[in-house]
Image (cartoon, rainbow, N blue to C red):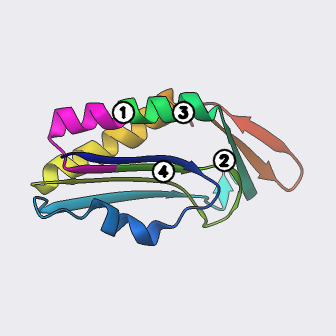
Amino acid sequence: MKKTIIEIVKTLNVDVVYKELSDPKSGGICVFVGTVRDFTNNEEVISLEFETYKVMAIKEMQKIANQAIDKWNLNKVVIRHAIGGKGVEEPVVVIGASSGHRDACFTACRYMIDTLKETVPIWKKEVFKNKTVWVSAHP
């Protein structure tokens, strides 16, 4: 049975993801963790703030997971995104996949994070020392 975990949360705990993805049929587990970096466009980032339309975001994230499972025959998928304020080095998104072979889970993780950034209604505000900027879907 294929298992997915799709969540919008206040705080991410990346330590649990391996256990959530582990499966006796999986020879590969791939996890992508997106974090807050300290500079964007030569400006120092203080923090990021994330907002979402949760019901629609969950629906779109599930659609992405289902597409990846079908296309790459994944055993398990985790898509978890944080909302609220996040400081430099804090995780904001975790995408994970497990599959019989490594190529499938690597490719699926790339597809899922790229598609999430393009289609899921999660909005990011960058907070700098002297200004704040809402960022479009494409950096």
Which residue is at 38% across, 64% downward?
Answer: 17
Residue position marked by numbered label 4 in the rendering: 80
* 123 in relation to 76, above or below: above
* C-alpha distance separating marks 1 and 3: 11 Å
Which residue is at 46% across, 67% downward?
Answer: 14
* Crowd class of label 4 (few under 14; some 14 to 19; many from 20; radius 10 Å): many
* C-alpha distance separating marks 4 and 1: 12 Å
* Crowd class of label 3 (few under 14; some 14 to 19; many from 20; radius 10 Å): many
Where residue 128 sits in the image (x, y, percent)?
Answer: 80, 53
In magenta stretch: residue 85: no
Q: Does residue 83 appear left or right of residue 20 in this picture?
A: right
- Mark earlier in primary sequence (2, 1): 2
Q: Does residue 118 appear left or right of residue 99 in this picture?
A: right
Residue position marked by numbered label 1 in the rendering: 64
Q: Point out the image quarter for the C terminus.
A: top right
Q: What mark, if any, has residue 41 been given in the picture?
A: 2
* C-alpha distance separating marks 2 and 1: 30 Å
- Mark earlier in primary sequence (1, 3): 3
Residue type at mark 1: give it: Ile
Mark 3 or 2: in front is 3
- Observer-nearest of 32 and 135: 32
Residue type at mark 4: give it: Arg
Instruction: Kindly check if marks 2 and 4 are in contact, taking CB atoms under 8 A apart as contact.
Output: no
- Mark earlier in primary sequence (4, 1): 1
Residue position marked by numbered label 3 in the rendering: 57
Which type of secondary structure does the marked residue at label 2 adopt? loop
* C-alpha distance separating marks 2 and 4: 27 Å
Magenta stretch, residue numbers: 64-77
Q: Does residue 79 appear left or right of residue 13 in this picture?
A: left
* 84 in relation to 55, above or below: below
